[in-house]
Image: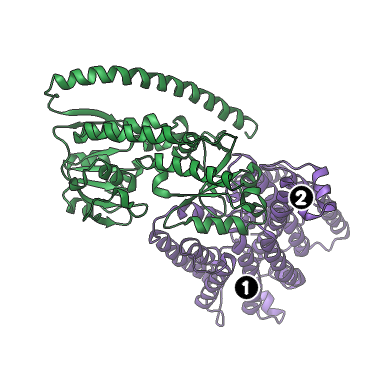
Amino acid sequence: MSGNEPRGKFTRLGMRHIALFAVSLLAITSCTSNEESGQEEQAEAARPAGTQINNCGVELELDSPPERVFTVKSSTLEMLLALGLEDRVVGSAYLDGPVPEELTPSGWTPNVVSDEIPSREVLLSHDPDFVLAGWESNVSADGIGERDELAELGIDSYVLPPACEFDNEVEQSVTFEDIFAMFEEVGVLFDVEQEVEELVANQQQTLEDIEQPADEVDVLWYSSGSDAPFVAGAAGTPHMIMEAAGVNNVLDDVARTWFSISWEGFVSEDPDFIVLVDAPWNTAEDKRERIESHPAASRLDAVEAGNYIEIPFAATEAGIRNVDAASMVADAVAESQADQ
Amino acid sequence: MFQHRNTSAGTSSTRSRLRFHVTFVLALVVLAVSCVLATGLGAAPIGLDEMWATLTVPSVDWSMNQVIFAEVRVPRVLTGLAVGAGLALSGLVLQITLRNDLAEPYLLGISSGASVGAVAVLIFGLGLALPVAAFFTGLLALFITLLISGFNGRVTVYRVVLAGVAVSALFSAVTSLLIFSAPQTDSYRQVLHWIIGSLSSASWETSAISGATLLVFGGVLIGLTRLLELFQLDDAEITGLGINTPISRGILMSLAALLAAGMVSVSGAIGFVGLMVPHVARTFARSSVRQQAILSMVFGAILLVLADTAARLVILPEELPVGIATSILGAIALCIIMGRKAHRRGV
């Protein structure tokens, strides 16, 4: 089994690259045609009474934009804030950390209903007409309820597409095109296409402004875990962020979003930099201590040189903070190289 | 259940002793080969020359592979060796003293007790070393089990088993409660890793803890095999020999539980080794409990070292918790042995 595995992964990766290329081509062509046809459609005015999209395999049909939104996880709330939709949020749950200041409208505080996934009763008590969930697993029976059950109660739901098909994550690889497409979809749902257009333009500019390092820089993305470090493979947002920052993900041969690696695997990758994800429940400092107290990991060059990059957890989930995370990675590398 | 066999007949005794010695020597060879293999294989394969060089080069000049060899691989193999041997011996002692083939090291609540301490540390930090917390909550569970089963009164096999079940259920519930009330968590994964049993956090400290536990409690148990042998008789017969059966049983069980607690504290509750290995060992040494104990330890060590190597390799660069691998390998081995036994008996 072990003999076949790497080849299987390689093939999958190869397939993915081809698929990616195809998707990017599609995205490019559809962008251009969208610009034209989009204007035409708008000119036609009267968008058909409802908005219809397929979200994680669920047909979503909205007669009017949601007015009372319940958000689960930070990524969803932050996206609404970035689009100036704070007034439509009736409650939020399962935040991954504090809302960044630059996203917080003055005089506004999040209505955090629950630190974790609330029960369905708690959700219903806020009388939402829409649930915006960061992960597909958020809308399940042991949480706020399955999507079809919610729909029966008149509550539509949208799961951020990069977190769709959780079981099938091997097949997908997130790109900034996906992220921007997600913004656009949300823009359509909430009837804020103009705002989304500005947001995407800004984010694209930020990405273009990133100064990529001249040399090859190998980075290992350490999210959590002590016995077996939980690290980023080639399929998720961390990989996308590292690519945008112009650095190599040392684990890009593993077609997974996240996985647990062994400490010896961690050490044998010998990265130039280590990203430490900073979450309230598992801080970057914890991870730094763990690495530095590990007999083998503590001897890595990156560790001896103190080459760590701290990234807030919420910025690592598909959403509006991914571009900032990419800048943070590139800046940290540039800063360290300038010191040398 | 197995019966006490009178094996005083000369030839059969000589033959069984020969059988034991041959098995023992072969098993030691297999163990040695397994250890070398286990040390060489993993995310970073390490050749024999590199291993050798590690011993001759000062540690500041080690390559990354040599650091992995000396600081990760060797302590891991040593921990696996001690834990495997300890769990198997503990299982054998409990199966004999409780006269129950399904007895295992965790029967007295040790593993669920240890889980409470370990999970508390994993989820809430607590500023306490995980093995220490796990060891003490494991002991607490053992103490409660013995208390409930009426340690000073008439402790019977049934009372012990029932008390163990009750205490295990109680402590498992506490573990679940801790997990459930955890602040935001991706600690689930770590908890799961620990509960299934894993050697991935092995270090020189865990080697020392498990090695010392094996030397102390395992050593005493080996020294007490004469007493253990008596438990092949029934309680009335043992009492007839002028021995206090409940107290003897209590002492043997406590030693076995302490042995298991030390192992669980470093590796989590690795399943199946303590349940299965004694049965295999018994097929190679039917008459002598001491021989069964020695073979159990060697077989247990082999199983865990090999299972851990497999756990490290099958889904590279990830790792399976070794508890999964021991259960799979152990179950297969047990089926083969049962099949051979049935075949030989013509069943």
Residue A206 drawn at (x, y percent): 39, 36
Residue A143 drawn at (x, y percent): 30, 49
Q: Chain letter for mark 1, please.
A: B
| Amino acid type assigned to the residue bearing label 1 in the image | Ser
Nearer to me, B153 or A181:
A181
Colour convention of the picture: by chain
Nearer to me, B233 or A291:
A291
Say what secondary structure mark 2 lies in.
loop
Q: Residues within 10 Å of mark 1 (few under 14, many from 20)?
A: many
| Amino acid type assigned to the residue bearing label 2 in the image | Trp
**In the shown orientation, is residue A294 left or right of residue B301?**
left
Kindly identify which residue carries mark 2. Answer: B62
**N-terminal of the two: label 1 or label 2?**
2
Q: Residue at x 62, y 51 (%)?
A: A305
Compared to A181, does B262 lie above or below? Answer: below
Q: Residue B147 bears which disc, if any? A: none
Q: How far is disc 1 from disc 2 in space, using C-alphas?
A: 44 Å
Q: Are marks 1 and 2 in contact (CB under 8 Å)?
A: no
Give the quadrant of the N terminus of chain B. Answer: bottom right
Foreground mark, 1 or 2, reads 2
Give the quadrant of the C terminus of chain B. Answer: top right
Say what secondary structure mark 1 lies in.
helix
**In the shown orientation, is residue A66 left or right of residue B33?**
left
Residue B14 drawn at (x, y percent): 88, 57
**Which chain is displayed in purple in the rendered image?**
B
Q: Chain letter for mark 2, please.
A: B
Nearer to me, B295 or B227:
B295
Image quarter of residue A82: top left
- Badge 1 and badge 2 in a common chain: yes
For chain A, give the colour.
green
Kindly identify which residue carries mark 1. Answer: B254
